[in-house]
Amino acid sequence: MANFRKIDESLFTTASCITRHPTPVLSYKDVPYQSALTFNAGVLKKDGKYIMIFRNDVGDFEAQRLFANEKGCITNLGLAFSDDGVHWNVEPEPCFDLHDSEIVRAYDPRVTFIDGEYCICFAVDTRHGVRGGMAVSKDLKHFEIKSMSVPDNRNMVLFPEKIGGNYVRLERPMPVYSRGGHVFDMWLSESPDLVYWGKSRLVLATEDVPFCNDKIGPGAPPIKTEKGWLVIFHAVDVDPERGKHGWEPKWQKRYTIGIALLDLNDPSKVIGMSKRPLIVPEGYYEMEQGFRTNALFPCGMLLEEDDTVRIYYSAGDAVVCMATAPLDELLALCTDPRQ
């Protein structure tokens, strides 16, 4: 493996400020239509109510072998509401299902409310590569596609307000040739209208993250704080000595969650980052049960009125989990040089 660099295992501990909810907050059992895997969900809070748009892979959870290979997997996006952010009521039908002669499926939604509309960022598998899509909706029932990137790009998240007069998004392009292998980094682009995107620039490179040797990418729309934009991201390390983890015959990767702080006026500038992961895989749902275990993927982050931060993440590419932490302690992780 050309890009393999052994990572110091002592780095991989969950930050002490993190409190996990003891069980997943969403699984296939909560979905009233055909479902095997429910994960990578965008979450926001509006008018006191929590809203989740989740990836739903159609199938039978018990027939695990059917999902040993994702090719040909049918995926739609489900919609759920909650009064407390823990117990969710899933709508009776999917809210978004995109496919045609070119588009295979849309998946991995992230959601931001801006300018009086919900903006959904999602990944799109097409017959000619992976694209990043953006759509807007006023009611979460009818969606207007605003833009689709060229291949290969994904993991887009939109900032909750304009910066310098433009919409801003974080994204993870996938330059296989120029970087070599799976070395993917986190970038930023701007747009005047959610349609045309440019002024693209690097935000955080894989080699800047001590607990990563493979790829990184944005996880959830950032939270604005007095000290900067708080961002969570996924970081992947690979070890060729790892064997079977989950339903796949072989899984050599580990997905962890990182945290960083970006400049308020120019969010392409990283002004702080924890040198250790924020959350690492632990316990049954993250290490034993799932399509791909040893894998966490951040997808939602909310700031509550009491300055508690909720972090929603998928575990094992199978269920949605939640953790909480005090805002000041998360900021300290990013700004304290001892961290």
Image: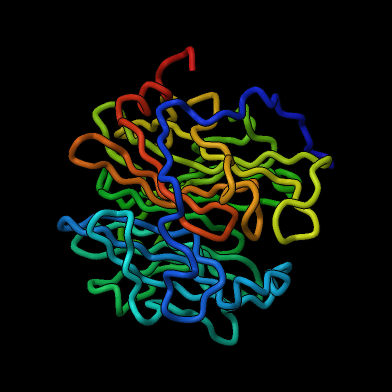
Q: Picture coordinates of residue 7 (x, y %)?
A: 71, 28
Direction top: furthest residue:
338
Residue drawn at x 50%, y 44% is 187
**In which image quadrant can residue 185 be found?**
top right
Closer to the camera in the image, 319 or 99:
319
Residue drawn at x 46%, y 56% is 320
Residue 27 appears left or right of 45: right
**In which image quadrant can residue 260 be found?**
top left
- Whether residue 55 is visible here, answered yes or no, is yes
Closer to the camera in the image, 292 or 265:
292
Residue drawn at x 52%, y 31% is 14
Closer to the camera in the image, 84 or 139:
84
Q: Picture coordinates of residue 289 (x, y %)?
A: 62, 55
Relative to 280, residue 320 above or below: below
Residue drawn at x 61%, y 48% is 295
Q: Picture coordinates of residue 293 (x, y %)?
A: 65, 51
- Whether residue 189 is visible here, answered yes or no, is no
